[in-house]
Image (cartoon, rainbow, N blue to C red):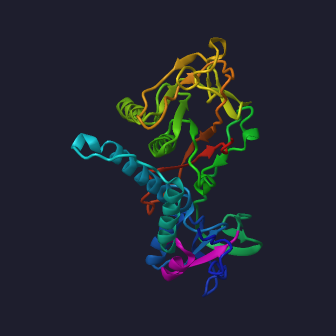
């Protein structure tokens, strides 16, 4: 992916209007809301300066809509292939090349990026500055120390990942929604904290691509902001894809386990893959005293083993390496403006634990 903040094409324009005086509109943030507002205002003849400290395109282009929907498309294709038998079409051995999937994700981003680039903004009549803005006065701003006067300002700085204060989470080195797209290996096991729209869509995508996925939500249902019917439909769809859904329970602690990490829940159970599964044929040589008691198991696809929740994991005599990932979802509303056609959506962040062997 192109790093626009370091690209030679990302050169700041002068922050003073061509005719002097004030800018009609100062836009802080080059994400979807800022881009749409800046282009719309310039189209009506306003003088517009957009300030972006990183790269134009925002969450939607780099870490949200574009990459997530491309990933979902690949996951949907895999799911259709597995279910083709219902239509009389036999598909044998559906295999997912996750590295190739992620290459496609990056290719789609690269294809769309020029539409949101500084060059596209300039072509629409918008001045673009690379920097950080502050507001020392009511109608004045400082852009990396340079004074800027304006009539109106739009702050559209978006959201950034926030880690919840769960003991042990920081030590696990979680990834965020800004870095998860750099993965090239499919997580064998994925734990999703938070059953909002982002957690549900990424959980389903990774499950369909081959990860063993669990979603833990503190509220009584998934999709708390939606109606109960929607929550029930999504829960049923996730379960059909082999996702283990736990609601009404908090994660109290993330601790190390044999070959990975364990999320300890408030009800005394834990979500982790132990060194051995609970019963034959996964661990036929384990003595009965060392087997792990299964607390809950959800239906899964034929492509993956069950995704049980275990209590008090105890290593067995046939250790099997595993990996576990943790996904945290934080959702916030984006800044809404009359020109912002995406105001009905939310933007958010995700985090995952790195893969461990």
Give percent across and percent down for residue 176: 64, 49
Magenta stretch, residue numbers: 116-131
Asked if residue 173 lies left or right of residue 205, the reply is right
- In this view, the residue farthest toward the left is 88
Asked if residue 265 lies left or right of residue 342, the reply is right
- Would you say residue 21 sits in the magenta stretch? no
Query: Residue visible at 77% across and 72% down?
Result: 145
Query: Residue visible at 47% across and 32% down?
Result: 222
Query: Residue visible at 39% across and 48% down?
Result: 78
Residue sitting nearer the eye, 92 or 139? 92
Asked if residue 103 lies left or right of residue 83, the reply is right
Query: Residue visible at 65% across and 76% down?
Result: 7
| Residue 220 appears in the figure | yes
Residue sitting nearer the eye, 106 or 321? 321
Give above or below for 150 relative to 200. below
Residue sitting nearer the eye, 101 or 180? 101
């Amino acid at each position: 992916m192109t790093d626009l903040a370091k690209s030679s094409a990302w050169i700041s324009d002068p922050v003073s209007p061509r005719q002097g005086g004030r800018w009609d509109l100062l836009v802080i943030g080059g994400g979807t809301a800022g881009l749409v507002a800046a282009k719309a205002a310039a189209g009506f003849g306003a003088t517009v300066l957009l300030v972006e400290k990183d790269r134009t395109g925002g969450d939607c282009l780099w870490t949200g809509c574009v990459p997530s929907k491309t990933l979902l498309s690949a996951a949907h294709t895999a799911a259709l292939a597995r279910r083709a038998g219902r239509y009389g079409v036999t598909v044998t051995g559906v295999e997912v090349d996750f590295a190739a999937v992620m290459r496609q994700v990056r290719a789609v981003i690269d294809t769309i990026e020029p539409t949101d680039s500084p060059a596209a903004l300039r072509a629409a009549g918008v001045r673009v500055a690379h920097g950080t803005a502050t507001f020392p006065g009511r109608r004045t701003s400082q852009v990396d120390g340079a004074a800027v006067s304006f009539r109106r300002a739009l702050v559209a700085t978006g959201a950034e990942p926030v880690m919840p204060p769960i003991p042990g989470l920081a030590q696990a080195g979680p990834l965020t929604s800004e870095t998860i797209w750099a993965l090239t290996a499919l997580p064998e096991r994925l734990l999703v904290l938070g059953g909002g729209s982002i957690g549900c869509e990424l959980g389903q995508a990774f499950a369909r691509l081959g990860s063993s996925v669990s979603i833990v939500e503190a509220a009584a249902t998934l999709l708390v902001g939606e109606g109960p019917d929607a929550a029930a439909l999504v829960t049923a769809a996730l379960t059909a894809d082999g996702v283990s859904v736990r609601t009404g329970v908090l994660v109290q602690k993330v601790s190390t386990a044999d070959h990975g990490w364990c999320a300890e829940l408030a009800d005394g159970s834990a979500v982790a893959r132990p060194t051995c599964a609970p019963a034959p044929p996964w661990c036929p040589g384990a003595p009965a005293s060392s087997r792990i008691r299964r607390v809950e198991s959800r239906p899964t696809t034929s492509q993956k083993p069950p995704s049980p929740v275990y209590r008090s994991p105890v290593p067995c005599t046939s250790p099997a390496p595993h990996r576990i990932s943790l996904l945290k979802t934080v959702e916030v509303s984006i800044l809404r403006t009359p020109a912002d056609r995406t105001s009905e959506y939310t933007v958010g962040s995700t985090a995952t634990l790195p893969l461990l062997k």
